[in-house]
Image (cartoon, grey):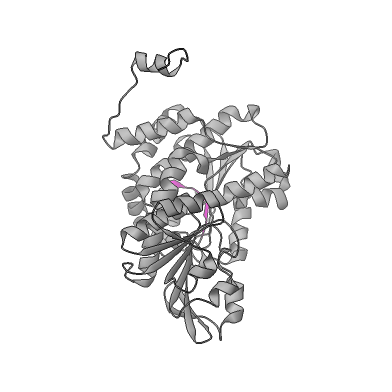
Amino acid sequence: MTIAHDIKDLDLATGGRYRIEWAGQEMPVMKQIRERFAREKPLDGIRISACLHVTTETANLMQTLQAAGADVVLTASNPLSTQDDVAASLVAHNEIPVYAIKGEDNETYYEHIHAALDHKPHITMDDGADLVGTIHKDRREALEDIVGGTEETTTGVIRLRAMANDGALEFPVIAVNDSATKHLFDNRYGTGQSTLDGIIRATNILMAGRVVVVAGYGWCSRGIAMRAAGLGANVIVTEVNPLRALEAVMDGYRVMPMTEAANVGDIFVTATGDISVLDRQHFELMKDGAIICNSGHFNVEINLAALDEMSNGSPRLVRPFVEEYQVNGRSIYVLGEGRLINLAAAEGHPASVMDMSFANQALGAEFMIRNASTLDAQVYTIPEDVDAEIARLKLSAMGVAIDKLTDEQENYLNQWQEGT
């Protein structure tokens, strides 16, 4: 049987299979869900188009959805995030159509998204809302088959809520990112570790003693700041939200506007979900040798067009994923083309944290199929009891036991008569 695909090289499949199996050992929650799905087939006959980072962890999610009876197609959610051996293994060993090549250009990226939508999905599974956005703008005929969708990222949820507020969203979507077992762990611990991993792999620099400027103080930025400080960096946080800025101060970081941080920072990391966080006025102030990178979903947080206009000549590739821009005699280094540095130059989040995130994706798809008829075209979160079950399964897999309320304690929490 010939499986439709557009990947780099099928001959990479064996190596990809080994790495997928390695990641699977770190994903015990997904294993338990996959075993139940294989018995119950809750997604039998459901077509799913997934636009996700094509990694070993994503492969385990695809296998879980397939075990549930789903007919799955996978495309990349970022031109630099694909692991080509994983894509090959999914095609060769799991017969899953994959459209993803690491380093693909923007035109190819959207051709692949359209190929995934040709699957006529009942469920969309997004990491950045590009599938949903493309459906609403260019492929509205796909709306006839769609039951609902799931969304993985902060950036995607922001876009979807904007669509819902404008009355533009045509089907319900589960904001997987807003589950506690996703953003409290994946965003903080996963992004924190993998971002520093990407920076170090790309540059081989010592973090200790460096001034690291983290733009934003959401859950991803909290993790980045935490891990940078843990490696001995002097961390500065920039924010627009006074509550988050105050929290950063209370957590022990210096907080200041980016225009003040620009001339003292050695390394700049953006993770805000907004545009032009690092802009022309900041590049003008940066010192010679400044390193800038992005850990937000889209490559808009660094105004590369402005940096290119300011530079003397074309950027020079000095190391893989490291481009040097010359600006008035100063070198400014951009990592990973301003795309997600943790996936451009490293392997993304560790499997053990993606175990919970993708458990939310799998259970979110199941919840959508079971409940779509009662849901409006809005953005929803996974119910708290499902979130708590994922945490329970994770603790069990880690060999951690917790207390349980006694009947007396339960009754006390559910009454109001008893006082001081």
Magenta-colored stretch includes residue 342: no
Near-viewer residue (342 or 24): 342
Image position, residue 374 (x, y; %) = 64, 27
Residue 399 visible in the picture: yes
Compared with 46, 246 (above or below) is: below
Left or right, residue 279 beside residue 199: right
Identify the residue at image location x=53%, y=64%. 257
Magenta-colored stretch includes residue 93: yes
Looking at the rendering, which quadrant does residue 145 occupy?
Answer: top right
Image position, residue 347 (x, y; %) = 39, 58
Residue 127 visible in the picture: no
Left or right, residue 52 beside residue 397: right
Image position, residue 320 (x, y; %) = 42, 73
Q: Residue furthest left?
A: 399
Left or right, residue 213 beside residue 18: right
Magenta residues, as a range?
91-100
Identify the residue at image location x=59%, y=40%. 149
Near-viewer residue (393 or 268): 268
Image position, residue 258 (x, y; %) = 53, 66
Identify the residue at image location x=40%, y=62%. 235
User: Quarter holding the C terminus?
Assistant: top left
Q: Please give the count of numbered marks on the rendered protein.
A: 0
